[in-house]
Image (cartoon, helix red, strand yellow):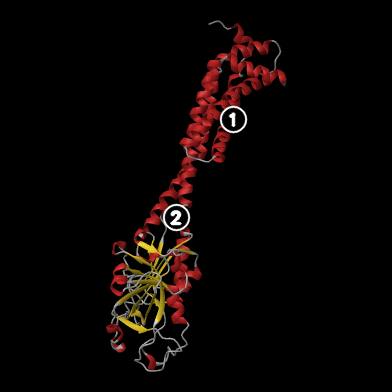
Amino acid sequence: MKFTVTEAGYQLTRNRGRSIIMLCVSLLLCGCIAFYLGSITTSERALRNINESNPAVVNICNPTGDSMENLVINTIHTDLLQAGWEMKDLRLTSQAAGAYSKEAREQDPKGFSGGDTKILGINCVEAMGTPDQRYITYMDGYDGSCFSGSEPLCIISEDYAGENNISPGDELSMPMYLCKYRSDRRPVYYPIFDSDTWGGDEFETPPDWTLKVVGTFSHKLGAYHQADVYLPVQWLRDTMDSQDLPFNDFRYSRLGKFSYNTFQCSPVDSMKLNEMKLKFLDMGFGIPFYMPKSGQSDFVDFSAGRSIWMDDEDFIKTAEKLAGTVRMYKAFMAPFFLVVVLLVTLAVLLVLRGARRDMALALSIGREKRDIAFVHLLSSLSAQGLGCLIALPGVLLLARVDILTALIICGAFLLCAVIGDIMGLWGLLRFDALELLTKTD
């Protein structure tokens, strides 16, 4: 065995031209395999990461699908959606209004129409509508995460703060009203009471609710959902849900349960869209542009948030394109590696064709064909392995794959090389030694 290995090394260094050709062929074929397997890896990675780069978006809309804003979305629907499927990037808003000034407080509660303070409950800064957060200034110890909790905190506009002489760290106290919408999309305001201040008078003035001002924002914020005051929507919900009040008593028509005005989120696994849509229907959600069947009422509540609008067209197009690319590459994987094996075989036949006389001489002195083939197999694989080592840095940089994938690429080539070398040597050694040695050119 030692002699065989020594002879293989001698063949590798003695015939440097053949070895260099084998090395160059190895570099070329390794590059082709790296490009092929790298393309599959890249497409599969993009398919896995599509939830982050281009996720589907779930919105609650009205029955006709023409609005996702200014809706009355009962908490039972939002809770069902969050419990029924794993969601991320949740954005919730709930509109309210306040009466801060003396003039607004003196307004007849029966005809309250928005007061002087526009309030919006949000669960994250992004729920404002893609604002530029550079224009929000928080007190030390506070940041945008304050909206994800349920503490009575808020940020106010600089204009509102200047008009009312309010600074960060101050308390903001005023009666508050939850804004809902009628079936014709007109707003109606429900005062926020609690069991200690509700006296039973249908038109009595609601109590003051106190918030701590923890920041201000500039008019340059550019929020789509504009307000004078932003506060945690969970505090607004908890405040209303904690009221032990007779919501179902017709005498108290000015009381109302908490509801959201917008709902948006993305599924964690958007690859299960069809399963998700079926589950939404099982939950009782409608679909946009729903037409009432015969015998049903033609009445449509245009502010009712009980339907789903799935913004998934871009996601589906991108996912189908990537999945199709992966399927195509995998379908041609077997033919591709067959071509690699044939190219290695052809290279062995052409490069070692000139070594047949040396093989014949070895056979004439009693060497076995098996031993001769093993020597040339070792020398060829050594040159090809050296080519893999040289190609490895290029594979890592150009194909942009990790070290494990690069090693798999080199291993795949070496496997093809072994098969090709064996086939090539089998073809080369099919000769008669005496006839080859006595043949004259």
Residue 244 drawn above or below residue 266:
below
Please give the name of the residue rendered at 40% of the width and 94% of the height, measured from the top-left corner. Answer: 200
* Residue 425 visible at all: yes
| Number of dots carrying numbers | 2
Residue on which disc 1 sits: 419
Query: Mark 1 falls on what kind of element?
Result: helix
* Spot occupied by residue 248 in the image (x, y as percentages of width and height): 43, 90
Viewer-nearest residue: 436 or 116:
116
Instruction: Estimate how packed mark 1 is, as few (under 14), some (14 to 19) or many (20 or more) residues with alpha carbons within 10 Å.
Output: some
Residues 215 and 107: in front is: 215
Residue 251: image quadrant is bottom left
Residue at the disc numbered 2:
52
Q: Which residue is drawn at 36% across and 62% down?
A: 136
Horizontal relation, residue 323 to residue 119: left or right: right
Q: Which mark is residue 301?
A: none
List x then y, in percent, for residue 261.
37, 74
Is residue 298 visible in this depiction of the protein?
Answer: no
Task: Please state which of residues 79 and 191 is positioned toward the viewer in this rendering.
Answer: 191
Image point (58%, 31%), residue name: 414
Please, what is the three-letter code of the amino acid marked with disc 1?
Ile
Quadrant of res 212: bottom left
